[in-house]
Amino acid sequence: MDYEFRRDGFGGYRARFSMGHEAIGQWLIDEVGKDEAVLDELFAVIDCLSARQQEEFRRPGRDYSLTLTQEEAEVKANVLNISLDEDLDDLAYYDDEQLALCGLEDFAAVLTSWRAFIRNEDW
């Protein structure tokens, strides 16, 4: 999974992710932004999941929802009322920008990079 963070000319943020992971970038912009309390919470949850002290974590958001398990992270647009357990045929309306999955370690690395980015005014 490749990604790049940038500031736009209006003081906002841009997060560009490789194909299949675009929803993670949009989730960062829409649901996390510069809120380090959210990042602190997510890092604590990831520690619990990695230590097998917790099986799953869900964080519903305005536009996107996050689900973390001991192995992976899922970011899904709230407009998708589907379950990944359904048959692939039922996913005909799947949109790359609406759903993204990655490993929990990769997701933690994204959060670490995002935190460094929002703290650094020179980016």
Image (tube, rainbow, N blue to C red):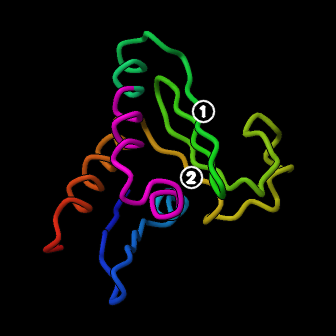
User: Which quadrant of the figure has residue 45?
Assistant: top left
Report if residue 39 lies within the magenta region.
yes
Give the side of residue 122 with respect to residue 50, left or right.
Answer: left
Residue 121: horizontal and vertical position, in percent? 17, 71
Magenta segment's dominant SS is helix
- What residue sits 69% from the left and 64% below the top? 95
User: Which quadrant of the figure has residue 4?
Assistant: bottom left
Q: Quadrant of the C terminus?
A: bottom left
**Label 2: few (<14), some or many (≥20) within 10 Å?**
many
The amino acid beneath tag 2 is: Ala
Ranked by sequence position, the earlier of labels 2 and 1 is: 1
- Dot 2 corresponds to which residue? 100
- Dot 1 corresponds to which residue? 58
Q: Secondary structure at mark 1?
A: strand
Q: Which residues are magenta?
A: 27-44
Task: For the residues labelled 2 and 1, say whether their Cβ atoms are less than 8 Å apart.
Answer: no
Distance Cα–Cα, label 2 vs label 1: 15 Å
